[in-house]
Image (cartoon, helix red, strand yellow):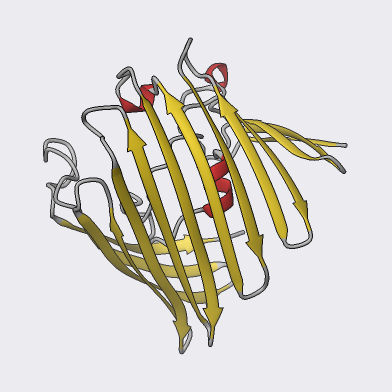
Amino acid sequence: ANTDTDLDGDHDTGGAVNGQAGEVYISGAFGRLAMGDVDGAAQAAVGQVDGVGLTGLGDWNEIIYMTGKTDPSMLYSYTTGQISFYLSAEQPLGGNHAWGAGFRWANDAYSFGLGYESASDNPDLGAIAGRIDQIVLGGSATFSGITLKAVYAMTESTLTPVGDEDSYAISASGTFSGVGVTAFYREDFGGSGAYGLGASYDLGGGASIVGGVVRLPDFANDGTTLPTAGDVVSDFGLSFTF
């Protein structure tokens, strides 16, 4: 068996006391069991469509997953050939809990993922008593240097502010004459959409020029601390990989 500790800076903040400062895992012939700041099973199986920009510009390409949002979490995965299975669970505060299951098939050109998740009294939703069940499916296809991705989520909820809603996201990414181009569209709860366009150019030696533009959905926020709903945000800069 193998063990490892991951303190990736992209993980949620909150400190090791809350299981939010990295992950630890053990793996072997039985699969892989990870605990800490890990994704839920549905997200691990299905994932997200491609985003744009140097900073992500708010990650408006991403749909909302119910599990793996509040740490600490546990994720079990098992892969055989082109097929992977996932199970996850979390219990961040007292009776609040969530769990999920997922399935993924992938080869060099195509992938398909299916996930189910259920959350009760989820503090991510304002500690409102209730339950949310969500089925998420997605896939990708790559041909002629272009990758298409799509994710669709069907949500049933007893929470009045949420209700039964669907959301989806699509993206297309490709490289043309050395320039990488990505476009996405996402429509979330309430029927308001966000869309973005980004580009990158590899300078060599691990350096790239990256930029993007995103139009925020109509309900993005109240405009007090973040860009106003419906605004356009952008970024541009250098990215280094070592």
Closer to the camera, 16 or 138? 138
Q: Position of residue 105 (x, y in %)?
A: 65, 61
* Residue at x 51%, y 53% (from the top left corner): 47
Quadrant in which the N terminus appears: top right
Q: In the picture shown, does residue 190 fall above or below 211?
A: above
21 left or right, relative to 136: right
Closer to the camera, 161 or 34? 161
* Residue at x 39%, y 50% (from the top left corner): 153
4 left or right, relative to 170: right
| Residue 27 found in image quarter | top right
Q: Position of residue 50 (x, y in %)?
A: 43, 63
Farthest residue in the top direction? 94
- Residue 142 visible in the picture: yes
Q: Position of residue 13 (x, y in %)?
A: 46, 29
Q: Position of residue 104 (x, y in %)?
A: 63, 55
| Residue 236 found in image quarter | bottom left
Quadrant in which the C terminus appears: bottom right
82 left or right, relative to 217: right
* Residue at x 84%, y 40% (from the top left corner): 30
| Residue 73 found in image quarter | top right
Closer to the camera, 213 or 155? 155
